[in-house]
Image: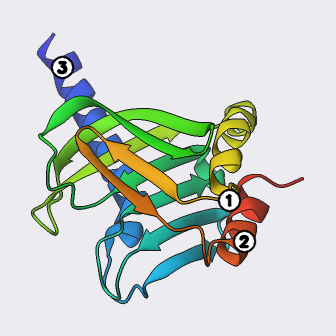
């Protein structure tokens, strides 16, 4: 019984370590320029980010990890939020909206609360994400980001080119 429990703990620690290794480059934060940007790497990973000011918090990160069939959603520095295991992040633009369930937890790097969702996303799941997310990102008005009691507007100006790069990796075809 104890050996089985030790194996489970070891597996969980290894899994968490792998996920952390996937996400740490995205959370590194310094050097980000204000506005929308996309980072793409050769492993078929794309990260669409919005930062309100140079070296500021990443108010939104959408990550598509095609090499491991994963999708992540992050939002840093939620000043009004409380830690929670089941929190909803919603992006809305006019009638279009995209909502996900994740956690609000303390970021070990910044010491501030942030929203995190790390989920599986095979090709079928990516099609479902695409159907809900792209209408929000391609809408005309500002994007309303809501997590618990925190809500802010993200501009759509400057989103076109980064979104095309992100879409080409995450949602090809």
Local secondary structure at mark 3: helix
User: Which residue is drawn at the image coordinates 12% and 40% (left, top)?
Assistant: 82
Instruction: Decide which of 51, 32 is in the foreground and name it.
Output: 51
Q: Can you identify the residue that label 2 sits on?
A: 165
What residue is drawn where x is 9% and y is 63%? 111
- The residue at which mark 1 appears reads as 140
Disc 2/disc 3 C-alpha distance (Å)? 44 Å
Rendered position, 118 above or below 155: above
> Toward which corner of the image does residue 78 lie, by quadrant?
bottom left
Q: Nearer the viewer, residue 173 or 162?
A: 162
Mark in front: 1 vs 3: 1
Q: Earlier in the sequence, mark 2 or mark 1?
A: 1
Q: Label 2 neighbourhood size at 10 Å, few (<14), some (14-19), many (20+)?
A: some
Residue nearest the observer in this picture, 19 or 80: 80
Q: Is 115 positioned to the left or the right of 124 in the image?
A: left
Residue 60 x, y percent position in the rendering: 42, 60
Disc 1 and disc 3: Cα gap in Å?
52 Å
Instruction: Identify the mark nearer the N-term, 2 or 3.
Output: 3
Q: Which residue is mark 3?
A: 5
Q: Position of residue 135 (x, y in %)?
A: 70, 46
Query: Tags 1 and 3 in contact by the CB under 8 Å rule?
Result: no
The earlier-in-sequence mark between 1 and 3 is 3
* Disc number lying in front (2 or 1): 1
Say if 115 sits above or below 108 in the image. Answer: above
The reply to whether residue 170 is in sight is: yes
Left or right of residue 37: residue 148: left
């Amino acid at each position: 019984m104890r050996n089985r429990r030790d194996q489970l703990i070891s597996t969980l620690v290894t899994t968490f370590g792998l996920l952390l290794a996937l996400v740490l480059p995205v959370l590194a934060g310094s050097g980000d320029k204000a506005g929308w940007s996309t980072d793409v790497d050769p492993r078929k990973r794309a990260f669409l980010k919005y930062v309100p000011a140079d070296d500021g918090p990443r108010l939104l990160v959408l990550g598509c990890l095609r090499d491991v069939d994963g999708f992540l959603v992050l939002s840093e520095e939620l000043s009004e939020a409380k830690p929670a295991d089941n929190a909803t992040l919603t992006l809305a633009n006019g009638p279009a909206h995209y909502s996900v369930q994740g956690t609000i937890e303390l970021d070990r790097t910044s010491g501030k609360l942030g929203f995190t969702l790390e989920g599986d996303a095979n090709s079928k799941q990516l099609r479902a994400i695409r159907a809900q997310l792209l209408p929000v990102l391609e809408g005309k008005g500002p994007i309303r980001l809501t997590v618990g009691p925190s809500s802010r507007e993200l501009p759509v100006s400057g989103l076109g080119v980064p979104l095309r790069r992100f879409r080409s990796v995450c949602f090809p075809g």
